[in-house]
Image: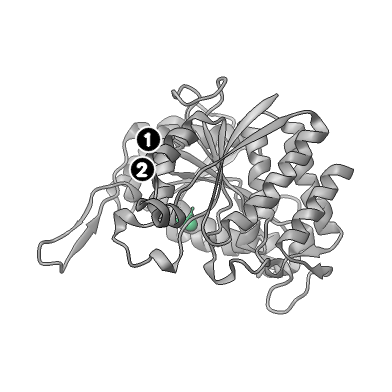
Amino acid sequence: MNYSVAIVGGDGIGPEVMAPAQDVLDAVGDKYGHVFNYVELEAGGRAIDSGGEPLPAETLEAAGRCDALLLGAVGGPKWDGLPGHLRPERALLGLRAGIGVFANLRPAALLPQLRAACPLKDEALVAGSDDGRPGFDLLIVRELTGGIYFGERGRSADGYSAWDTETYSVAEIERVLRTGYDAAAARRKKLCVVDKANVLESSRLWRETARAVAKDYPDIETSYLYVDNAAMQLIRAPGRFDVIVTSNLFGDILSDEASVLTGSIGMLASASLGSPSDPLAKNGRPMGMYEPIHGSAPDIAGQDIANPLASVLSAAMMLRYSFALEKEAAAVEAAVNAVLDQGFRTRDIAGFGGAGTGGRIVGTRAMGEAVLKAVEEG
Ligand code: IPM
Ligand code: MG
């Protein structure tokens, strides 16, 4: 089959980590008989520099025409002084809302090879685990096109106060919950709704909606946590979590926290999915946008030291969710596992606080080549 993939490399390390992901996709294509046609698009700081706006209309339209979208990262200090609506991050939010990808899946698991890069003690890693072995394997499902990111915001005329509003409708809460339940059904069948229902009215609506939706999923154990407690439990006993469903802002924060537990934010991939009944859905599958959760990391851009694994793993998620190529997705994940077994490490996953994770430190390109080779030989 032929697939069209929109590529937004973006800013900072974005293009550097996107290149290995494309190489790995091409290797998968050669091996399994698929062709990935890339459509390179501009967004973020780079688009501001060339045309004055973070998300050119052509980018959004072209992305919607493709079968899926792979994105590196946007933003950087060069554009930090711009007003909110002209910042590179607007491109990200505009793409997410524009192609309707309301459910953001962020898996975080502890790979045994990276145990020493995880800052937690064994006690915490054992506390919540099902099999008594240190580890965790969780999935954060973050609502992505609503809440405070998209609510009304402004400043008073005198400039001495400002507001951002958290607004959610039942429909918005319900559809992301259902994505979470479907994911939980294929995993360990536990779903935790994270909110701040002891204070926020919007969270009380989340909880009421969740209680109603939960009735449709009797096989899944539903639990509820306030976000402050959830932040603590993630560090005390991450193994207790399977699927976490939460709002846009809480999901943003908790996923960065979870990423550190995996060893590095450079390991976390994500898939953002729309609805299969959406006009942009392709062959009955929801529109999908795939990106590493790390940012543009301008401080290390252009130095060939960024970790490309989150980006490669995002491409694997695209194979799985947008193209239903499960075997191919699993092959990419196995290749990443193999290179970690072989001892390849980028700087960020070489160990926490001086604890080495073995192996040898390589750059972005060498890590990408190692994965490529592992796909070819796997
Ligand atoms: C993320 C990022 C973005 C977000 C930023 C860059 C706007 O932190 O994808 O988690 O807050 O959603
Ligand atoms: Mg974030």
Mark drawn on residue 117: none
Where does the image place residue 285, in percent across and percent down from the top left? 56, 25
- What residue appears at the point 78 percent right and 60 percent down from the top-left corner? 366
Which residue sits furthest right? 377
Q: Looking at this view, is 288 or 214 the one in front?
A: 288
Type of amino acid under label 2:
Gly
Tag 2–tag 1 contact (CB < 8 Å): yes
Where does the image place residue 323, in percent across and percent down from the top left? 65, 29
Give whichever of discs 2 and 1 has the lower sequence position: 2
Above/below status of 125 relative to 376: below
Mark drawn on residue 146: 2
Mark 1: secondary structure: helix
Label 2 lies in ligand 1 vicinity (Cβ under 8 Å): no
Above/below status of 126 relative to 2: below
Where does the image place residue 22, in percent across and percent down from the top left? 68, 45
Q: Residues within 10 Å of mark 2 (few under 14, many from 20)?
A: some
Above/below status of 53 relative to 305: above
Q: Nearer the viewer, mark 2 or mark 1?
A: 2
Q: Looking at this view, is 140 or 232 the one in front?
A: 140
